[in-house]
Each structure stands twice: as C-alpha cells, then as structure tokens.
Image: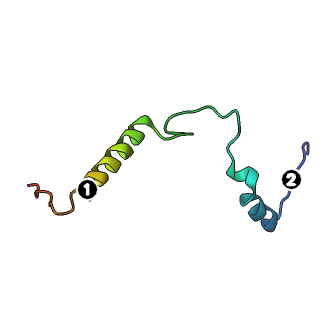
Amino acid sequence: LAGTRIICDRKFLLECKNSAAARTPPCCLPQTPGVTSLAQSSLVKLEELKERNESEEAMPGERPLPTEP
C-alpha cells in the first residue's frame, strides 16, 4: 500500500476543536455571501428586524393591529 495513514485519538481531536486556531478563520479566505459571510439579503432582514424592534420598544403603549389571514 502506498501513502501514509494518520491516526488521531478522540481526546486529541476534541482538544483541537477548542483551540484558538480552530475558532479563527484563515486570513486569505474569500468573502462569499451566504457561505463564508452572511448573505446580503440576510443582513438587510436583520437590520429591518432590529429597526422594527427598536420602534416597538419606543412605543410600548401602542399595540399592533391584528392582521387577517
């Protein structure tokens, strides 16, 4: 058989999961919306939800009108 087989035990792999290198993305990773970063539509939705929540907190006495199905 050709090649080298790398064998790691479970303890070592679990320690690697919590290492700083595993939590930091590579420096030259391309920014792909929806894959390596949030999609633009997701960012817009998050901003809209944040604005809506802030406006609801500013007007605590008012209730939203019920919508019909």
Q: Residue at (77%, 63%) from the top-left corner?
A: 15
- Residue 52 at x, y percent in the picture: 28, 50
In this rendering, would 59 be left or right of 42? left
In this rendering, would 23 be left or right of 37? right
Residue identifier under label 1: 58
In this rendering, would 3 be left or right of 43? right
Badge 1 or badge 2: first in the primary sequence: 2
Query: Up-down: is 60 above or below 2?
Result: below
SS under mark 1: helix
Query: Up-down: is 55 above or below 13?
Result: above
Quadrant the C terminus occupies: bottom left
- Residue 13 at x, y percent in the picture: 77, 61
Q: In front: 27, or 59?
A: 59
Going by the numbered disc 2, the residue's amino acid type is: Ile
Which quadrant would residue 2 be assigned to in this image? top right
- Residue 56 at x, y percent in the picture: 24, 56
- Residue 60 at x, y percent in the picture: 21, 62
SS under mark 2: loop
Residue identifier under label 2: 6
Mark 1–mark 2 Cα distance, whole angstroms, equals 59 Å
Mark 1 and mark 2 in contact? Answer it, CB < 8 Å.
no
Quadrant the N terminus occupies: top right
